[in-house]
Image: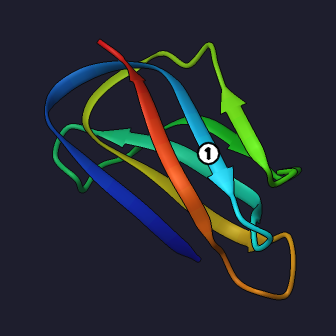
Amino acid sequence: MQWLQVDLGVTRSINEVRLSWETAYARAFQIQISDDGSHWITLYSTTAGTGGIQDLTDLAGNGRYIRMNATARGTGYGYSLWSFEVYGS
């Protein structure tokens, strides 16, 4: 398991996340948010990640911290995320 966490600085409303994977992608992962960086709420979860560009829309949550929590590899190469974009207000 590996994760990438971003501190947005203040609590934000999140409605979209765009992941751009390199060849090494996560087959299973969650997008999670938190107010304190310790207690996480899952906004999105999959065990069928496809790699490439994954545009996750219709998310609904508020938090200061957001992370992509990878739990299973899609290839034998580990995980390589080119960009992690977060949209909301």
Most extreme residue toward the left is 10
**Residue name at image x 47 percent, y 38 percent:** 85
Q: Quadrant of residue 23?
A: bottom right
Placement of the C terminus among the 4 image quadrants: top left
Vertically, is 22 above or below 85? below
Looking at the rendered structure, the secondary structure element under dot 1 is strand
Q: Residues within 10 Å of mark 1 (few under 14, many from 20)?
A: some
**Looking at the picture, does residue 68 appear above or below residue 64?**
below
Is residue 65 found left or right of 15 in the rendered image?
Answer: left
> In the picture provided, is 50 more to the left or to the right than 60?
right
User: Which residue was labeled with disc 1?
Assistant: 19
Residue nearer the viewer, 43 or 73? 73
Residue depicted at x 75% and y 66%: 25
Residue 41 x %, y %: 43, 38
Where does the N terminus fall, quadrant-wise?
bottom right
Front one among 31 and 21: 21
Residue 2 coordinates in the image, percent (x, y) = 53, 75
Answer above or below: position of 63 versus 40.
above
Q: Nearer the viewer, residue 42 or 7?
A: 7
Residue 24, position as x, y percentages in the image: 76, 73
Res 76 quadrant in image: bottom right
Q: Residue at x 61, y 45 (%)?
A: 19
Question: Which residue is painted at 43% across and 63% down in the image?
Answer: 4
Residue kind at label 1, given as amino acid type: Leu
Q: Nearer the viewer, residue 59 or 78?
A: 78
Task: Provide residue 61's location: percent of width, then percent of height.
Answer: 40, 20
